[in-house]
């Protein structure tokens, strides 16, 4: 029997906000440790509450002021004027394997791409490009943790949780600047 990883509800204060950007309405969720989740392409501001309930995080408080700096960084990023986000991250919603993959994503340089095979080798698990791809697809902080920089070995884009058109947009922003 395969044992599934599950996390217990977080007993720490959670804050969130929603803001508009080039890819639509985005929700930001943070714990006291840092950014916990980014939810892209929300249909409306109230829809973030559904996502919050799925995260098993208990109570969450809307607090736009806490995210002012991060929202400013997103604006700079989408204008091609920011190469690396500077905001604390809380990776606690992932398994140890996922966290390892997400941390390695942070080492892929702005404007560059790497393959799933490269990523598997970089975390010292060269036989696991598929598992790496799955962990990449579950990245809770897309854009800030740049999973869009991972492509197929042959250079094709592969998938992207937000849609391949968003992946292409992000890579175009980075490769143009």
Image: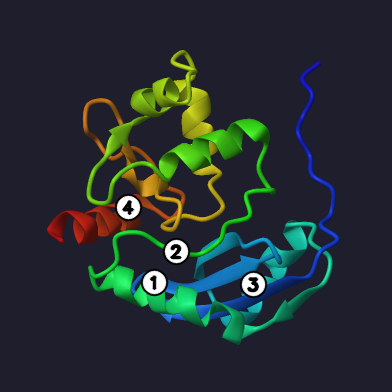
> What quarter of the picture does the N terminus occupy?
top right
Q: Label 4, secondary structure: give it.
A: helix
Q: Which residue has dot 2 on it?
A: 86
Q: Nearer the viewer, mark 1 or mark 4?
A: 1
Using the image, determine if residue 149 lies above or below residue 4. below
Q: Nearer the viewer, mark 1 or mark 3?
A: 1
Q: Residues within 10 Å of mark 1 (few under 14, many from 20)?
A: some
Whichever of callouts 3 and 4 sits on the residue coming sooner in the sequence is 3
Q: Residues within 10 Å of mark 3 (few under 14, many from 20)?
A: many
Inter-mark Cα distance, 1 to 3: 19 Å
Q: Position of residue 138 (x, y in %)?
A: 56, 44
Q: Label 3, secondary structure: give it.
A: helix
Whichever of callouts 4 and 2 sits on the residue coming sooner in the sequence is 2
Whichever of callouts 2 and 3 sits on the residue coming sooner in the sequence is 3
Q: Label 1, secondary structure: give it.
A: helix
Q: Is residue 75 left or right of residue 71?
A: left
Q: Residues within 10 Å of mark 4 (few under 14, many from 20)?
A: many
Q: Which residue has dot 1 on it?
A: 74
Using the image, determine if residue 165 lies above or below residue 115. below
Q: Residues within 10 Å of mark 2 (few under 14, many from 20)?
A: few
Quarter where residue 20 is shown: bottom left
* Residue 137 vs residue 13, the one in the foreground: 13
Inter-mark Cα distance, 1 to 4: 15 Å
Q: Is residue 21 visible?
A: no
Q: Which residue has dot 4 on it?
A: 167
* Residue 112 vs residue 169, the one in the foreground: 112
Q: Which residue has dot 3 on it?
A: 48
Q: Position of residue 80 (x, y in %)?
A: 23, 68
* Residue 68 vs residue 26, the one in the foreground: 68
Q: Nearer the viewer, mark 1 or mark 2?
A: 2
């Amino acid at each position: 029997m395969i044992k599934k990883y599950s996390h217990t509800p977080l007993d720490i204060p959670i804050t969130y906000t929603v803001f508009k950007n080039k890819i639509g309405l985005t929700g930001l969720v943070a714990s006291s440790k840092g950014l916990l989740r980014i939810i892209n392409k929300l249909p409306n501001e109230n829809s973030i509450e559904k996502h919050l309930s799925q995260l098993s995080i208990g109570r969450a408080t809307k607090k736009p002021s806490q995210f002012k700096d991060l929202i400013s960084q997103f604006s700079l990023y989408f204008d091609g004027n920011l190469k690396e986000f500077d905001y604390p991250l809380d990776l606690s919603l992932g398994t140890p394997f996922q966290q390892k993959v997400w941390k390695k994503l942070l080492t892929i340089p702005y404007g560059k791409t790497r393959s799933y095979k490269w990523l598997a080798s970089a975390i010292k698990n060269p036989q696991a490009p598929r598992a790496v791809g799955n962990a990449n697809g579950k990245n809770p902080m897309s854009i800030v943790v740049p999973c869009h920089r991972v492509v197929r070995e042959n250079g094709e884009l592969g998938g992207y949780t937000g849609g391949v058109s968003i992946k292409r947009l992000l890579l175009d922003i980075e490769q143009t600047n």
